[in-house]
Amino acid sequence: MPDKIKCTVSNCAYWENQMCKASAIEVNVDSGDTEAQSDSQTQCHTFKMKS
């Protein structure tokens, strides 16, 4: 996995200085399909709200 994954979701528990610090990430297509037509159809499912 790359060392640097940029993230702009500052209220995620894995966010640190605009980088994702999760040991692994999961990104899915919104519709459940295996192909997206654009980046707006994808979401990071690793998100965990900061406590």
Image (tube, rainbow, N blue to C red):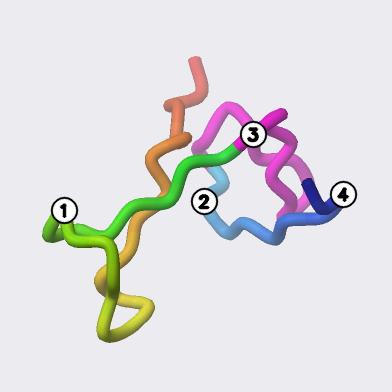
- Nearest-to-viewer mark from 2 and 4: 4
Q: Are marks 3 and 1 in contact (CB under 8 Å)?
A: no
Using the rendered view, name the quadrant where residue 5 is placed.
bottom right
Kindly identify the residue that appears in the image at 74 percent across and 51 percent down. Answer: 19
Q: Is residue 23 above or below residue 19?
A: above
Q: CA distance from mark 1 to mark 4?
A: 28 Å
**Which residue in the protein does label 3 denote?**
24
Part of the protein shown in magenta:
11-24
Question: Disc 3, disc 4: CB below 8 Å?
Answer: no
Question: Of the residues under marks 3 and 4, which one precedes in the sequence?
Answer: 4
Q: Main secondary structure of the magenta part?
A: loop
Q: Earlier in the sequence, mark 1 or mark 2?
A: 2
> For the residue carrying disc 3, how many other residues have a C-alpha within 10 Å: few (<14), some (14-19), or many (20+)?
few
Q: Which residue is mark 2?
A: 9
**Could you tell me which secondary element the residue under label 4 belongs to?**
loop
* Amino acid type of the residue that numbered disc 4 sits on in the rendered structure: Asp
Task: Give the residue at mark 1.
Answer: 32
Q: Is residue 42 left or right of residue 32?
A: right
**Circle 2/circle 3 CB separation < 8 Å:** no
Circle 2 Cα neighbour tier, 10 Å, few/some/many (<14 / 14–19 / ≥20):
some
